[in-house]
Image: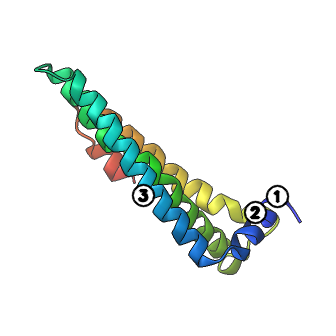
Amino acid sequence: MNAWDFIAAFADRVPAGVWMALAVVNVGLGWSVARRRMRHLGQRTRNDTTTKDAALTGAAMIPAVLFWPMGVAGSFHGLVAFGREELNWRDGWEYLVPGTLDGVSVTFAFLAFRAVRLQKTPVRCQRVV
């Protein structure tokens, strides 16, 4: 049994209620961290538009960073199962499915975010994805 099979077997043994409790804790911690961070950024913000942009970026990125692992974990689980059952890939090859699909989409999402930050259009990144 390789490491990924061990992790998947462990995740399958965890009851759904535990995953829901972890999601609730993540939301609670996420809101408290975001609220504290926004309060701190708001105290620094006066009339400076650069600081306001930084505060808005922080407000958008904090929840995104907290919820991103949950979405990736669910996608990873489903895509590995797709690789095993539909494509009949085994011996580690099934992990290429989420690695390529999620990897490409996340990479181009960050490139699109970077384009917006540089005040350029993110259309090329959206077209590729």
Secondary structure under badge 2?
helix
Q: Name the residue under label 3.
A: 27
Marks 3 and 1, the one that precedes in the sequence: 1
Q: Tally the marks.
A: 3
Of the residues shown, which amino acid type is indicated by label 3? Val
- Going 86% across and 61% down the picture, which residue do you hit? 2
Of 112 and 42, nearer the camera is 42
The disc label shown at residue 7, or none: 2
The disc label shown at residue 3, or none: 1
Say which quadrant the C terminus sits in. bottom left
**Does residue 18 appear left or right of residue 33 in this picture?**
right
Cα–Cα span, label 3 and label 1: 29 Å
The disc label shown at residue 95, or none: none
> Are circles 2 and 1 on residues that touch, CB within 8 Å?
yes
- Going 62% across and 62% down the picture, which residue do you hit? 97
Q: In this view, does 24 lie above or below 52?
A: below
- Going 71% across and 66% down the picture, which residue do you hit? 94
